[in-house]
Image (tube, coloured by chain):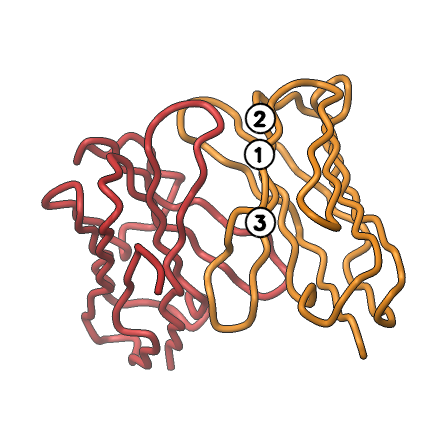
Chain colours: A orange, B red
């Protein structure tokens, strides 16, 4: 199995702080996706990165795909309580097969 | 309101029961998936259907039986489950192709007693 390790597993911060979540693997992926899941709901796609070295920004969120397409990071600037949730990375390997990471649970307190 | 609807939202069943989970998507997608989400484990892919044909069965025990009668509906039939099968079962759909997003339902929280 192609394991995607996310770090940290848990993160509890104050509103306004910055944070980075990492997603690492020894496998190469054709694309990598980030999802956020809130309690009682399914994961919702935030972004897809396809090209090695690609950087995408979504308001206060910055996503980067590693040059070798084995790892990715998510940086949040000035976190807000609405950012609270479970962040999941998912690497695409083969036809319609996504391998999900171990998850990072983020809590942003007011 | 998500384009993928799962019912029921919660299910409690005994080990000898038979029950079914239902998923319906209104997005016009051609692929549908079942995932299992357990505490402290990554999301596990169970089954993939593409154009109503099963293209992936990720070594899932036979007590889980999927059915995809058309591209909008997906079922997961459950029979003689074990307590360790208790989890959140998520359905998703997508269009085929590299980098296509999964659209998830809100899941069925299953408890096996």
- Percent across and percent down for residue B38 are 53, 63
Spatial distance from mark 2 to mark 3, Cα to Cα?
13 Å
Question: What residue is drawn where x is 17% and y is 51%?
Answer: B73
> Which numbered circle lies on residue A31?
2
- Percent across and percent down for residue A49 are 62, 29
Position above or below: A10 against B101: below
Chain identifier of the residue bearing label 1 in the image: A
Q: Residue furthest toward the left?
A: B69
Q: Quadrant of the N terminus of chain B?
A: bottom left
Q: Secondary structure at mark 3?
A: strand
Report which residue position mark 3 lands on.
A35
Q: Secondary structure at mark 2?
A: strand
Chain identifier of the residue bearing label 2 in the image: A
The earlier-in-sequence mark between 1 and 3 is 3
Same-chain check, marks 2 and 3: yes
* Label 1 with label 3: CB-CB less than 8 Å: no
Foreground disc of the pair 2, 1: 1
> Which numbered circle lies on residue A48?
1
* Label 2 with label 1: CB-CB less than 8 Å: yes
Question: What residue is drawn where x is 79% and y is 43%?
Answer: A22
Mark 2 surroundings within 10 Å by alpha-carbon count, few (fewer than 14), some (14 through 19), many (20 or more): many
- Percent across and percent down for residue B62 are 27, 50
* Label 2 with label 3: CB-CB less than 8 Å: no
Mark 1 surroundings within 10 Å by alpha-carbon count, few (fewer than 14), some (14 through 19), many (20 or more): many
């Amino acid at each position: 199995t192609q394991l995607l390790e996310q770090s940290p597993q848990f993160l509890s911060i104050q509103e306004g702080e910055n944070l980075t979540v990492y997603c690492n693997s020894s496998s190469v992926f054709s694309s990598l996706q980030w999802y956020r899941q809130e309690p009682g709901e399914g994961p919702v796609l935030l972004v897809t990165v396809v090209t090695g070295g690609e950087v995408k920004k979504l308001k206060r969120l910055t996503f980067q795909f590693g040059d070798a397409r084995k790892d990715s990071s998510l940086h949040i600037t000035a976190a807000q309580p609405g950012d609270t949730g479970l962040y999941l990375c998912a690497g695409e390997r083969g036809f319609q097969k996504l391998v999900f990471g171990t998850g990072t649970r983020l809590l942003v307190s007011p | 309101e998500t384009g993928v609807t799962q019912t029921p939202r919660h299910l409690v069943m005994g080990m000898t029961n038979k029950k079914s989970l239902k998923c319906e998507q209104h997005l016009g997608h051609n692929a549908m998936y079942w995932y299992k989400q357990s505490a402290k484990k990554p999301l596990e892919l169970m089954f993939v259907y593409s154009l109503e044909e099963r293209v992936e069965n990720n070594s899932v025990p036979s007590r889980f039986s999927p059915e995809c009668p058309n591209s909008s509906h997906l079922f997961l039939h459950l029979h003689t489950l074990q307590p360790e099968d208790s989890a959140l079962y998520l359905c998703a759909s997508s269009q085929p192709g590299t980098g296509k997003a999964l659209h998830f339902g809100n899941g069925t929280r299953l408890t096996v007693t």
